[in-house]
Image: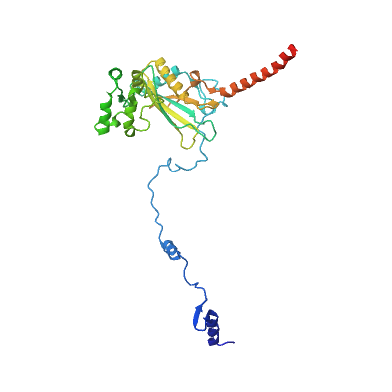
């Protein structure tokens, strides 16, 4: 066995070399230094993780934002169920009864009689359920908000202050006579620019096309959906008709469900129970026809179900909306193209017969 001194000598001789007989050159790798960032990682590992305490969350909000696989389909289809055979049945096992609009109104009037709820002039709401599926399976109709002109106005209890911009005495006088809250031209625009007038008090902004170039200056002060445009019906020549629509019409909005994107709903007040049945029915027809204009370009139903409700009663009375609007639409473009191709084929077939007859 080698002595310790000889082992140390051998190790020393292997770890250094003589350069030109005088200078030592170190050749052993420096492997004792820690890797970069090791100490920082060690310090982070020692830090205690503080768990933030979450306050009380309601049971219906605990699963918000998470995928709910067990959620039921909100499109109710009871066409496979049988019709009730008498006037007493368990609604779970039979189809929903379909009322006429007049019958539904009279049923709500009975429940709101002075001997029951004692609210004879309660508001009547139409709950419209929609299939928000767009042209493609992965696309859905965007949420929309619209105003419907109705023939029979009613007290809606909303802030309907209307500001109208126009140039010239005739359109300004027409707007004043129609019931606009505030009417003006260039001077009114300057007041808004200087901050003397707050537009938050006026939920609806209407304008005549002759003042549109000057109105662009305050576009930034108006919200995106408040700036007048012809698509929403807030820009036009007939100011009296526009003011009547936004002052007394039905304001409604359609929104998709957070969990089920192809399901949308609309809740709109169509009048009060003391109004005439025909007047309420006409308001409902105007609402359904306006909703049907937002139908996507696909086959199938857009409006799936309509219920009439009148709080505080919990009765949901189903009506048939397809008496007033078409249930399903078929795409006409494809059929027209097919007809054109068929006509061309018929012409091609007839041409040789004429030529053979001439020969």
Tell me where residue 271 sits by quadrant: top left
Q: Residue at x 49, y 20 (%)?
A: 325
User: Which of the 4 image quadrants contains residue 116?
Assistant: top left
- Relative to the observer, which residue lies in front, 295 or 320? 295
Quadrant containing the C terminus is top right
On screen, 228 above or below 275? below
Residue 237 picture location, percent across and down: 36, 19
25 and 166: which one is in front? 25
The residue positioned 54% from the left and 81% from the top of the image is 11
The way the protein has been coloured in the rendering is rainbow
User: At which x and y percent is residue 342?
Assistant: 65, 20
Residue 277 at x, y = what percent?
41, 16
The x and y percentages for residue 316 are 45, 26
Q: Nearer the viewer, residue 251 or 207?
A: 207
Query: Which residue is outermost to the left?
Result: 196
Instruction: Using residue 280 as the reference point, say whether residue 302 is left or right of it.
Output: right
Q: Is residue 24 visible?
A: yes
Q: Quadrant of the N terminus?
A: bottom right
Task: Residue 208: tell me if it is visible.
Answer: no
Q: Residue at x 70, y 16 (%)?
A: 351
Q: Residue furthest top?
A: 358
Query: Along the horizontal axis of the image, is 133 left or right of 217?
Result: right
């Amino acid at each position: 066995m080698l002595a310790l001194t000889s082992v140390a000598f051998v190790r020393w001789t292997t770890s250094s070399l003589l350069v030109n007989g005088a200078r030592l050159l170190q050749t052993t790798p420096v492997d004792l230094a820690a890797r970069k960032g090791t100490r920082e990682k060690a310090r982070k590992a020692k830090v205690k993780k503080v768990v933030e305490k979450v306050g009380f969350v309601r049971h219906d909000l605990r699963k918000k934002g998470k995928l709910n696989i067990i959620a039921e389909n909100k499109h109710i289809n009871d066409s496979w169920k049988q019709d009730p055979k008498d006037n007493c049945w368990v609604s779970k096992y039979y189809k929903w009864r379909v009322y006429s609009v007049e019958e539904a109104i009279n049923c709500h009037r009975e429940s709101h009689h002075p001997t029951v709820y004692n609210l004879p002039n309660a508001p009547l709401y139409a709950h419209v359920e929609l299939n928000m599926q767009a042209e493609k399976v992965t696309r859905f109709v965007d949420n929309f908000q619209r105003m419907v002109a109705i023939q029979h106005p009613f007290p809606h209890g909303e802030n309907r202050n209307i500001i109208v911009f126009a140039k010239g005495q005739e359109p300004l006088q027409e707007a004043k006579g129609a019931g606009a809250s505030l009417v003006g031209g260039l001077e009114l625009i300057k007041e808004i620019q200087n901050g003397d007038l707050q537009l938050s008090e006026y939920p609806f902004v209407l304008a005549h096309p002759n003042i549109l170039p000057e109105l662009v200056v305050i576009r930034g002060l108006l919200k995106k959906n408040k700036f007048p445009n012809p698509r929403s019906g807030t820009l036009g020549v007939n100011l009296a008709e526009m003011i009547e629509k936004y002052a007394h019409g039905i304001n409604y909005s359609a929104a998709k469900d957070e969990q089920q994107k192809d399901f949308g709903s609309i809740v709109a007040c169509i009048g009060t129970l003391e109004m005439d049945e025909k007047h309420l029915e006409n308001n409902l027809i105007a609402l359904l026809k306006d909703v049907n204009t937002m139908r996507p370009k696909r086959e199938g139903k857009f409006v799936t179900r309509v219920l009439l409700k009148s709080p505080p009663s919990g009765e949901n009375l189903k009506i048939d909306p397809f008496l007033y609007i078409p249930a399903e639409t078929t795409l006409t473009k494809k059929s027209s193209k097919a007809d054109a191709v068929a006509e061309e084929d018929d012409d091609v077939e007839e041409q040789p017969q004429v030529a053979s007859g001439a020969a």
